[in-house]
Amino acid sequence: MKILSKDETVDSLEWSSLESIDVAGQHRSPEHGSTYRLPREASRLIALARYIAYCIVSRAPLLYLTVWGLGLSTELPDLFLAYRVAHGDKRPIIDAPLHQFNATEEEQLATVLAMILLFGWDSILFSKDLSFRIITSHHEIITFQFSDPNESFSFESELSSYGLQLCDSGV
């Protein structure tokens, strides 16, 4: 796992900016997917994080923390920062909000994603080619977006077993 600043990420991806994924909730393409209410049980959130990591780690995803430190009683920021320090990075989240995973780092991805889900932080998990995005929100929802409708269907067909409930289109 590499922990990166926004500038380091843009350089690494050879993009001009992070705008295509970082536009105040207006995420461009992929087009297929849905939004779900997250379960409240910690065990289900951890199982969901493991499922997501298992499904997408082979695509060397990046995880972008967009909102944290909301003062929620569910937050343990020292635990998150200690995990980052254990992986060799002492910078605060504001200076390095992105985490890049390689195809062999399923456990690290599951761990970081589980903490984000448990703490109620906002994040965007995405692939370099933007063929998928998974967006978490402190509003206790998660959105799955895929370019390929078959991949979206395949991935989402398993979600009910993790306690996720589909939101109405008004969310």
Image (tube, grey):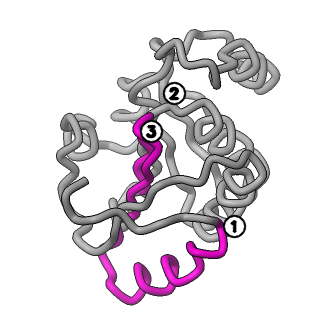
Task: Tell me the amino acid under the disc marked 2.
Answer: Leu
Q: Of discs 3 and 2, which sits in the foreground?
A: 3
Q: Say left or right for 91 vs 76.
A: left
Q: Calculate the distance from the C-alpha at mark 1 to the C-alpha at mark 2.
A: 22 Å
**For the N terminus, which image quadrant?**
top right
Establish if 151 lies above or below 56: below
Q: Calculate the distance from the C-alpha at mark 3 to the C-alpha at mark 2.
A: 14 Å
**Residue pointed to by mark 1:** 54
Q: Report if residue 100 lies within the magenta region.
A: no
Establish if 80 lies above or below 161: above
Residue at point 63%, 47% (across, down) = 40
Neighbor class of circle 1 (other Cα within 10 Å; few <14, some 14-19, many 20+) is some
Neighbor class of circle 2 (other Cα within 10 Å; few <14, some 14-19, many 20+) is many
Task: Tell me the amino acid under the disc marked 1.
Answer: Tyr
Residue 126 makes an appearance in the image:
no
Q: Nearer the viewer, residue 42 or 57?
A: 42
Residue 7: x percent and y percent?
A: 36, 24
Task: Tell me the amino acid under the disc marked 3.
Answer: Ser
Q: Say left or right for 51 vs 3.
A: right
**Residue pointed to by mark 3:** 123
Neighbor class of circle 3 (other Cα within 10 Å; few <14, some 14-19, many 20+) is many
Residue 46: x percent and y percent?
A: 73, 51
**Residue pointed to by mark 2:** 4
Q: State which tag comes first along the sequence, 1 or 3.
A: 1
**Region of the chain picked out in magenta, as a range:** 134-162
Q: What element does badge 2 sit on?
A: strand
